[in-house]
Image (cartoon, rainbow, N blue to C red):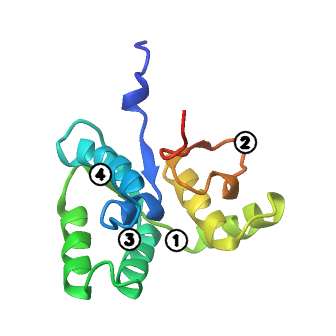
Amino acid sequence: MTATKASDEIFLVDSNVLIYNYDEADPAKHKTAKALLDSCWKGERRFALSAQNLSEFFYVTTRKNILDKKKAAIIISDIINFPGWIKISFDHSTALEAAKISEEYNMHYWDALLAATMRQNNVLSIYTENAKDFKIPWLNVVDPFEKK
């Protein structure tokens, strides 16, 4: 059996990382997010995104006038059609699992839904700015913006 390189591990990219890729208000976070996502677009890494992430991306970027609706929709279409992005989704049973996770780990339902979706799709690592929101023992949470 071959050891897996850390770069082979599939990470879900949380909505905030995806948004910072297009939001230049914080140049340091924009640069970090862009470098991370560019590694996917260049075929160097594969990342996962959930239907929930894409929905949050559209809502936030258009509500905060980061992107207009047409441009945000084009970006979502590009992600959907690009094989380097692993698209994951949830079903009815995931909603129930999210309710249980929300209760067990005392977390917001929408974060629990993302965690349940990840587990259902065997994606157990996440890049997110909100590491404090994902205090789940079976989840590998990495804040790409954290100063090292």
Q: Are marks 3 and 1 in contact (CB under 8 Å)?
A: no
Residue at horizontal 29%, vertical 38%? Answer: 45
- Which numbered marker is on residue 137? 2
Q: Quadrant of residue 114?
A: bottom right
Q: Earlier in the sequence, mark 1 or mark 4?
A: 4
Q: Is residue 37 above or below residue 94?
A: above
Q: Secondary structure at mark 4?
A: helix
Q: Is residue 82 above or below residue 42?
A: below
Q: Earlier in the sequence, mark 1 or mark 2?
A: 1
Q: Which residue is mark 1?
A: 91
Q: Residues within 10 Å of mark 3 (few under 14, many from 20)?
A: many
Query: From mark 4 to mark 2, how far is it between C-alphas?
Result: 28 Å
Q: Are marks 4 and 2 in contact (CB under 8 Å)?
A: no
Residue type at numbered disc 4: Lys
Q: Residues within 10 Å of mark 4 (few under 14, many from 20)?
A: some
Q: Position of residue 104 (x, y in %)?
A: 82, 59
Q: Which residue is mark 3?
A: 54
Judge whether residue 48 can be spotted in this image.
Answer: no
- Say which quadrant the N terminus sits in: top left
Q: Nearer the viewer, mark 4 or mark 2?
A: 4
Q: Which residue is mark 4?
A: 34
Q: Nearer the viewer, mark 4 or mark 3?
A: 4
Residue type at numbered disc 3: Leu
Residue at horizontal 30%, vertical 66%? Answer: 22
Residue at horizontal 54%, vertical 32%? Answer: 148
Q: Secondary structure at mark 1?
A: loop
Residue at horizontal 37%, vertical 78%? Answer: 61
Residue type at numbered disc 2: Pro
Query: From mark 4 to mark 3, how far is it between C-alphas?
Result: 17 Å
Query: From mark 3 to mark 2, how far is it between C-alphas?
Result: 25 Å
Q: Are marks 1 and 2 in contact (CB under 8 Å)?
A: no
